[in-house]
Image (spheres, helix red, strand yellow):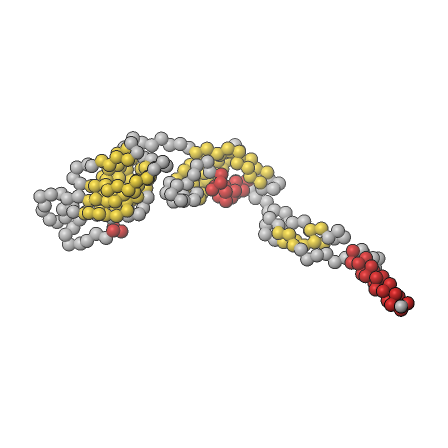
Amino acid sequence: MKKQAIYLILIIFAVIVVGYLSTTTLPGIGQKACTMEAKVCPDGSTVGRSGPNCEFAACPPAPMMDEATAVKKYLTDNIATVAPNKPVLGGSWYVVNMTVSEDTNIGTVVYEDGHIQSTAQFTYSFNPATNAVTIDKIQVNEVPPKPEEKASAKINQTILVNGIYITPLKVLEDSRCAVDVQCIWAGRVTVNTKLENRATHEVKEIVFTAGPLNTAFSNKNITLVTVQPEKNSKTSITPAQYVFTYSVK
């Protein structure tokens, strides 16, 4: 029994010593081992724990960036959340051009979503010590639409004409008289066309013929002004070759 008690005391003592050595730096033995954790720094690099307190080492300083470059990078990366207006038809904003005046802290950014383009002016603040950019104010330059506008599109291409999004979907009829044939009737082209604005959308059959035919949508008149190419009796027109010009007033 005495031997067992002695063995038990020795085991408990050994456990206490090992625990003490694992958390204490002893003279001549050196620093305790730190856990193998890593911290990801803003530049993508990682640092580990070190020192007597096993603290994370400092991240490398951010590379210095000139003011205009920092502003352009910030807006390019964040235009989707900074822009005051929303993209349309499921698109996403991306920057296509930008100017920055470091003297006035004012800039102009041009951005689009694949369907429409917007231009906005902004003011900003810049912290050269951290390259931090803050957009203080951004406002879209509103351009009033003209009384009448025209634009051209191919099949399944969307255009914005005087506040109306127009997408020609399918040619339902092309009975135009061929340019190399004499006809008693000019014929017509009927195009299944999707019309949209921010409030509603509708698919309508829009007709091109010798005289203008207006199609009403959202208190405006949509007219199919021209259809290209002209018809020829010796060749056929594929859907991809059609170009439709619409006007809205």
Image point 52% across, 40% down: which residue?
Answer: 71
Query: In this orientation, does residue 214 appear?
Result: yes
**Numbered circles on residues, count:** 0
Residue 65, given in percent of the width and then of the height, sits at 57, 44
Query: Where the C terminus falls, by quadrant?
Result: top left
Q: In this view, does 235 lie above or below 189?
A: below
Residue nearer the viewer, 188 or 77: 188
Residue 147, given in percent of the width and then of the height, sits at 29, 30
Image point 50% across, 33% down: which residue?
Answer: 137
**Rendering quarter of residue 142:** top left
Residue 106, given in percent of the width and then of the height, sits at 50, 33
**Rendering quarter of residue 152:** top left
User: In screen coordinates, is 150 left or right of 47?
Assistant: left
Image point 38% across, 45% down: which residue?
Answer: 114
Q: Is residue 120 above or below residue 188?
A: above
**Rendering quarter of residue 218:** top left
Query: In this orientation, does residue 31 appear?
Result: no
